[in-house]
Amino acid sequence: MSLEDEILVRIRPTAEETARIDAVAKHLVDFVRSYMDEHGIDAELKLVGSYSKGTYLANPDLDLFIMFPPETPRKELVDVGLKIGEDVLHGTRMYAEHPYTSAVFEGVDVDLVPNIHIKDTSHLETAVDRTPFHTEYLLSHIKEGQADQIRLLKKFMKGVGTYGAEPNVRGFSGYLCEILVLRYGSFRKVLEAAAEEWHPGIQIELEKAHVRLTAPIVFYDPVDGKRNVASAVHEDTFNRFIAASKAYLAHPDERFFFPRPRQPLPESEILSRTGSGLFRLLAISLGKPDTADDNIYAQVWKSQYALENKFRRFGFEVFRAVHGVSDGRVTLLFMLAHDTLTDSMLREGPSADGKNAQAFLDKWNEAGIVRPFIRDGKWYAVVPRQYTSAEDMIRKEIAQAGVGKNVPLDSLKVLDHDTAVKECDRLLLSELLDPREAWEN
Amino acid sequence: MSLEDEILVRIRPTAEETARIDAVAKHLVDFVRSYMDEHGIDAELKLVGSYSKGTYLANPDLDLFIMFPPETPRKELVDVGLKIGEDVLHGTRMYAEHPYTSAVFEGVDVDLVPNIHIKDTSHLETAVDRTPFHTEYLLSHIKEGQADQIRLLKKFMKGVGTYGAEPNVRGFSGYLCEILVLRYGSFRKVLEAAAEEWHPGIQIELEKAHVRLTAPIVFYDPVDGKRNVASAVHEDTFNRFIAASKAYLAHPDERFFFPRPRQPLPESEILSRTGSGLFRLLAISLGKPDTADDNIYAQVWKSQYALENKFRRFGFEVFRAVHGVSDGRVTLLFMLAHDTLTDSMLREGPSADGKNAQAFLDKWNEAGIVRPFIRDGKWYAVVPRQYTSAEDMIRKEIAQAGVGKNVPLDSLKVLDHDTAVKECDRLLLSELLDPREAWEN
């Protein structure tokens, strides 16, 4: 039995699991239907998502759409739709791009989503309007055996850390995995394409798209050619999937599907690596942004990039940065070439023929360590550095750095090298010091 | 009397000087003419250069061309021409682009240059062939009073250090000064154009040119539109002239024409500036290249740039560099942000989707201080630095740095910060530490 067949045995839902979820789905639809009939609500019910497509791994959520007639005003359908969710499921109102109800029904997570039953994709208004079309597209195009291929791809993506469009993964959604298999034919063929053909800017389509989009990877939605299904995929995640595909094809291993949890480095190892004098750590600890979970991660990434830019702008070379969220705080951990610098730096001025040269001369003729001189068509001067300490710089500049807007700046703590080694989470320190991929554990 | 009129009084040749050089020129031509008549040599004599154009400052050289008929074989004219120089002037044979004789005649430096008397500029073969046409062009286009304007511009260019096409100045030739005044009308108008309109890539022409050339400044030769008269002008000299023009127009001063000699900084000042810990000096001393003077400077500049590149490539930031030639040795003096670096550096690897990724991974998974990770689409690793000492780096890399080819590498001496402060010429140290322009002394 091939490795992939072995994996499938482990990840394909068992007959029992399938029977159970089928039963729950049927009960759910019947239950909602009878409530609606009782209350004279005119709408169709439609199961969408991975359960409806038969591409789920285990314990799928159920996504039930309440499809109101096209002429229904949006406010009415939202009011009525949410009320159904509350009355029937005693669920919680949620507001993503679109309001819906989230609940647990017979032990299964259920999302109940009111939307408009549009007839074709030329009238798409919101992201949820597309979802039923995704289900239809997949069901009408999937070939014998491809559901298992999709399962393998999803599990692989999960294993190597590239699954999910949320901001903490910035990766490949379930639907994207499905249409990748439709496009290339099988799990292996997707990996082969990634390993051999993909490059930043790759354009993929199943149906002819009539616009051109740019991103690390563009997969034109077959039901809406103006949309990039892969828009959430970050360049780094894209490249991680390529690297994982190459590594797997060279040496297939179950660890790509079932990664072993990362073990923190032993404390002695952390001490010897951080005590080498080869680099300096600086940790920035902040309160967790007061916002939805997805948003937290978006803001943490934004903050990390913004702070990396500040470091570089002020002459502190960043070797590498990682972040972690735990215990109500966010920790951004930076590995710097230096955390203090000498007092002087080369300051590039305006071009020598330009209008602004005089201001530069006036300023640095007096204040320069070496007054202005011309090199390669520009004025330069050796000037005193604004910050010689990275910690100092961060404290003074963080308010103008462009970190996520819900990041509470009054909660700032800056941990110098020794404090960071002592106080930071050992797993986070290990991640910084030893950037192995999930499949390498 | 305006400043420029005052300057003119000081730089315009006196009536006595003019009478004296006119007399020498006449004697010279008569003397050579009579030798040629005696020996039956069929050639015309023509004075060219700044004397012939009446644009000289003082004590001009005399450039006398012996113009042989077009059918004369080049070998014959060279043999005959050089023999005239030897017999008449007892001069020295010189070989620039073209052989000629150099001598002193009645106290005046004379170059006697054999060439072909071509009828028009479509038959130009060598640079000297153009010279008589330059004289003719200038004489037929110069307007009343412009000779003095040219004198002002030449003296200004000398004063600010931008005069001369030789490799140690990399500046504006006398002919270029002449045609700049023809083009813009006067000394001031040339400076105004430079201050207000010139930018790198400026294209100037007097006669329609039918090719396009690129350089910091292109002035199409009016007698040969395929040639850039300003090809020797380096970007830095170009910008120095712009800066000088702006400074002069804002505050006219005789110092632009008669700069005071630069005074070295007092020793105490040099010690306090170099002892500040704000930068590190490194001097590289080499034997003088065994070649013609012009060539020496070309090779010294080339060496300076080549070594600056080496420093940067290995992570040593160069704030500024200067060079000096004296006592048979060349000294290249560098101001560095650091002359030693930590053991680690960020190494950029191939793009993550590329074919070469595996080699990078294989190498640095083992040898890296931090093994490879993906950032912004590329592999990176934190790796040990090849050189942590700038001195070490120079000793090992200079042979592959691409310094001038006649630079004797076995004569290399590297002077560290303290030794450079002690042993380098004080004027050179001052030039590095205090990069004032000539007119600022």
Image (spheres, coloured by chain):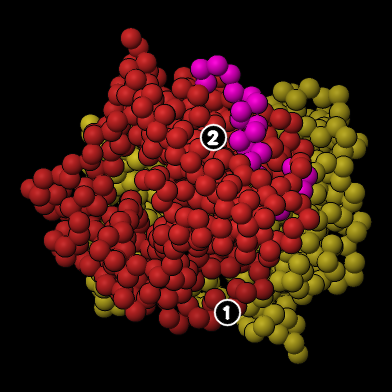
Chain colours: A yellow, B red
- Indicate left or right for A209 with A11 as reference: right
- Any magenta on residue A306? no
**Front one among A253 and A345:** A345
Query: Which mark sits nearer the N-terminus, 1 or 2?
Result: 2
Label 1 Cα neighbours within 10 Å, binned few <14 / some 14-19 / many ≥20: few
- Indicate left or right for B270 with B385 as reference: left
Q: Residue A391 appears at what percent x and percent y?
A: 25, 48
State the predominant SS element of the stretch in magenta. helix
Looking at the rendered structure, the number of numbered marks drawn on it comes to: 2
Quarter of the N terminus of chain B within the rendering: top left
Quarter of the C terminus of chain B within the rendering: top left
For the record, the magenta segment spans B121-146
Q: Which residue is mark 2?
A: B52
Q: Which residue does the image show at 55% across and 46% down from the upper left? A: B64
Say which mark, if any, is on residue A383: none
Q: Residue A361 appears at what percent x and percent y?
A: 33, 30
Q: Is residue B438 above or below residue A329?
A: above
Q: At label 1, which amino acid type do we have?
A: Ala
Q: At label 2, which amino acid type do we have?
A: Ser
Q: Which residue does the image show at 80% across and 72% down from the upper left? A: A189
Q: Is residue A223 above or below residue A430?
A: above
Q: Residue A263 appears at what percent x and percent y?
A: 41, 75
Q: Which residue is mark 1?
A: B359
Q: Which residue does the image show at 80% across and 49% down from the upper left? A: A220
